[in-house]
Image (tube, grey):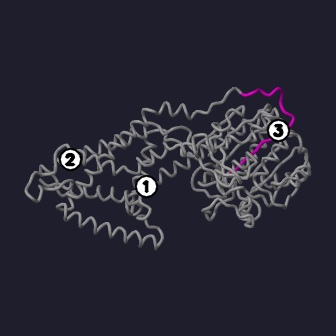
Amino acid sequence: MRMPMGPPADASGGSSLRSPVRDLAVALSLANLLLLRLWKDNFALLAASNQYFLEGPPRPMRFLGVSAAVAVLGIAFFVAARLRDAGWARGATTLGFWAAAGYAANLCRLEVPWLRGGSTAAGLRAVALLALLGIGAWWLARRCGGPRRLAYLALLVATPFTGLNLGRGLLAVATYPRAKAALEAPAPPPRPAEKPPARRLVFLLFDELDFEQAFARRPLELDLPQLDRLRREAWSAESAYPQSNWTRASVPALLSGQEVFDARPAGPADLRLSLADREVSWRDLPSLFSRARALGVSSAITGNYHPYCRLFGDQVAQCHAHSDYPEPRDWAELAGAYHQNLVHGVPGARWLGLDRFTRQYGRKHVERRASMYGSIHGEAVTLVGRAELGLVFAHYPIPHWPPIYLRDSRTLGPGGSYLDNLALVDRSIGEIRAALQVKGLADRTALLVTADHAHRREGPEKGDVDLGNPAHRVPFLLYLPGGSPGVIHRELLRGAATFDVAVAFLAGEVQTHADVSRMLRKSCRR
């Protein structure tokens, strides 16, 4: 009895290795390998370090979808093998099984760094290793009785991994309610403000807002009237550098005043920070919000990337956190994400036209980022209009990739560029200031605008900031109500100093632009 999934009778003439139970196990094993990347990505979401960036645990639909796909594919392979044994479409089923086996083998190859290739040297090394593996497989095939028998045995040996993946997936489904409850942000009732504060601070943090492109080397065709106006009226630093080129480390420096050299997620609400002399959890450090609370100032947060509500929910009056990695909202969106992963393992997918659905999923990703921006900006506009809040912090996902704005039509959507996103930053600042005017709060509200890092045009591989490289500069604009003319600060300013400036303003120690310069001259953080 011959089939591509299994061997013929033993060469010695003994009984065949095959049986219906073994055939079904091999079929499920092949299906499991075909979906290897889906299993890997889903299980990665269960890691405590990855859950730091998630709004909640991965939904059961992820694991149920892959489990159902394994079962359906496995049964289909088993039925096809039975039909082939009965003499139906032998050529087509043989070709189909070997194509599936080759695809599964290629997925396994992509999971091994030494076999992926990349550069010329890495490609040659991968070719050499694949050649050695091919020789080894040929030798084993001769010893085992042919390639069909070797493939059958290999899939049979891999059968336990099918049960392991299905078991882990079902366990994730069963424990989902408990995991979801563990990731909820506990927020005890905040202490209400006794009266509207006389001084308010709106802190706008823009992801990847670049000083060079916004000001120093702005293209002539880009008009940023709100940023220009703010710079004319504000205390502005021309040599402001972030603490890190990565958001995970730069934002903790801004909000804690510590010089953070690295940051490592260790749990849903645990970011381990490497300081000059120790490693500490971000939650264990005083924050801008805890200092504001100690001063009797009520705060509010809206933003993305960091789980702000799990970190600071008990320190603020209101909090909105948005994940950069949202869960699929329905089965169609989940199918798009899975299709993107599966096409990754097909050589020449773009040439074959298989990436059409992937491109559609990419457009959906832009739409979701635009929707997240809209939510954050809408929340920020609402929060800055609440007179009882003395501190409003908004972390925007722009102008960071992907482009979500078209400045010519002033609409959200795909097809733009980094410069278009810069125009959206400008528009957002204008709408925030307009909201303050409408609510009659502009005359007692300071506005701080800065960035977590500059535009990473060349994609720096390290988080280190080169203080001698102008391309690493970020804007730092502090508008103080009162109508005094703007001041240009040309000395070095590091990101950790932002904390000092904000706390000093809330404490009433900074009244004018001259106070800001005087305070920084005395500070060791400048």
Circle number at residue 23: 2
Q: Is residue 71 left or right of residue 500?
A: left
Q: Looking at numbered disc 1 in the image, what kind of residue is underneath it?
A: Arg
Residue 265: give x, y in percent of width and height: 59, 47
Q: CA distance from mark 1 to mark 2?
A: 35 Å
Indicate the quadrant where residue 198 lies: top right
Q: Can you identify the residue that label 1 sits on? A: 356
Q: Is the Cβ of the residue at disc 1 closer than 8 Å to that at disc 3?
A: no
Residue at which label 3 appears: 200
Residue that sits furthest to the front in the current view: 277
Q: CA distance from mark 3 to mark 2?
A: 71 Å
Magenta region: 190-206
231 up-or-down from 305: above or below: below
Q: Residue at x 91, y 52 (%)?
A: 518
* Nearer-the-camera pick, 297 or 523: 523
73 horizontally vs 245: left or right:
left
Residue type indicated by callout 3:
Arg
Tag 3's secondary structure?
A: strand
Mark positioned earlier in the residue sequence (1 or 3): 3
Callout 2, which amino acid? Answer: Asp
- Judging from the image, what secondary structure is the residue with disc 2 in? helix
